[in-house]
Amino acid sequence: MLSSSLVQQLQADLKGAIVLTPASQGYEESLKRWSETAEKRAGAVALVTTPEQVATAIRFARTHRIEQVIRGGGHGTNGASSSEGGIVIDLSKMNRVTVDPENMTITAEGGCLWKDVDNTAGDYGLAAVGGTVNHTGIGGLTLGGGYGYLTGRHGLVIDNLLKVKLVNADSEIVTASAEQHPDLFWAIRGAGASFGAVVEFTYRAHQQREPVWAGMAAFSLDKLAPIVKFANDFAHSQNPDASFNFGFTTPPHAPGPMLVTLSFYNGLGKDGKRIFAPLFEAGPAFQNFGPMPYCKVNGLLEESAGHGGRKVIGGAACAVPFALEFYEEIKQDLLSFIKEVPAAKESLLVFELVHPGKLQEVDVSATAFADGRSDNMFGSHDEKLVALKLKYDPTNVFNKWGAVTAAAVEQNHGYNTMNLKPKQIAVE
């Protein structure tokens, strides 16, 4: 843990920001993350409110060779927003959203959740391309690429990102866009957490008709065949205004695993009912389809994807057509696993169908993100990303995104000055 003198110095340098230590009221709550597996006991948590305070905290950590991490929404499961003994720079108080309806932009501070963006934009009849769970932080989802219900029509989140304000490894506050630091703007769209602490995002806004038509449904497991058939038909329908998720989980208050679906159509209810009519015909045990504001759609998974518990997220790509035998095998494997580990019944195994047309319109060289447009996370961009990492962060201040970080460190002859263990920090 940090010495008391270091904490006092940090508090003085931050000029008004709250700094929590293990002895502080609110410290334990500040450690909470979406997944309990990502929680660590920080030496100090700095509740910053301005870009200048973020810059000061990064400079302080670098000067004193202390591990620092950035917490946005705290939704990641790899622990990148937590530190064992180091400094957590917590952006959660930086949650202001401003809308410019004339220029069709939405600007959000780095600590915002998607519900902050959804609700504020909705007041203007606008929306940004965001995620599918509204208590997710905007930072991690955006910098990693990001997709959601509007992706079929408008593309990935990074395809709608116009500029960012970030604090770099030298504690400078810079703007990155197509006009300013374009190479940095290229890198942060897909590998952003390796290049700085983004404190402000500006997105392209889109007119959003109200209401949309959406809802969830749950089916007994013997309805797998009609659901898989519908998924295949849906995948071939090529409707950019619709999306469909299906999978297996134990819904809240259900006695055991069920088939679950989440359907979305950005248009009139009568058209939504027509598109998803086969789901009604399959006989759901539960459904809540209907017209609703777009911001409410992003809250449909709030309960089933709530905070707490031990979580980990993984993913893979599946090709269509979907084979019923494959999904029968998955179902049986999941049931067997739950029998062995009953606590795993709340796990969610989901297949997400999003119209790919808008993604494919964007050249793979346009951003650092290539997943879904190429065969791996960064496609052919690895060497360029490493070169930019060595340019903008040669001492590896931002070291939580392993792929870019490890390669850069190796090319820099192992010089990794900021990859410190908390036990190396002096204590009193």
Image (cartoon, grey):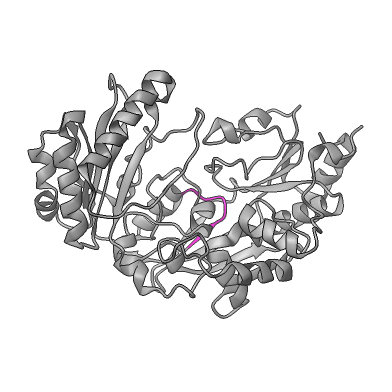
Instruction: State the residue in front, 344 or 279.
Output: 344
Quarter occupied by residue 128 = bottom left
The residue lying furthest to the bottom in this view is 179
Image position, residue 161 (x, y; %): 47, 67
Residue 316 covered by magenta stretch: no
Point out residue 188 in the picture as x, y percentages from the top left corner: 57, 65
**Residue bounds of the magenta highlight:** 107-113
Horizontal side of 64 relative to 173 (left or right) equals: right
Could you tell me which residue is drawn at 29 percent across and 39 percent down? Answer: 247
Residue 351 visible in this rendered orientation of the protein: yes
Q: Does the magenta stretch include residue 109?
A: yes
Position of 71 compared to 86: left or right?
Answer: left
Q: Which residue is drawn at 59% across and 61% down?
A: 192
Instruction: Report the number of discs.
Output: 0
Q: Residue furthest right?
A: 428
Position of residue 340 relative to residue 19, above or below, is above
Residue 395 vertical position relative to residue 305 in the rendered view, above or below: below
Residue 211 drawn at (x, y percent): 22, 53
Residue 1 position, x and y percent, is 81, 34
Image quarter hosting the C terminus? top right
Q: Can residue 401 be seen in this view?
A: no
Vertical side of 333 occupied by 326: above or below = below
Give whichever of 205, 350 is nearer the camera: 350
In the displayed structure, 12 sits above or below 333; it is below
Determine whether, in the image, residue 164 is placed left or right of residue 413. Answer: left
Q: What residue appears at the point 25 percent right and 29 percent down from the top-left corner?
A: 258
Judged left or right of residue 255, residue 174 is right
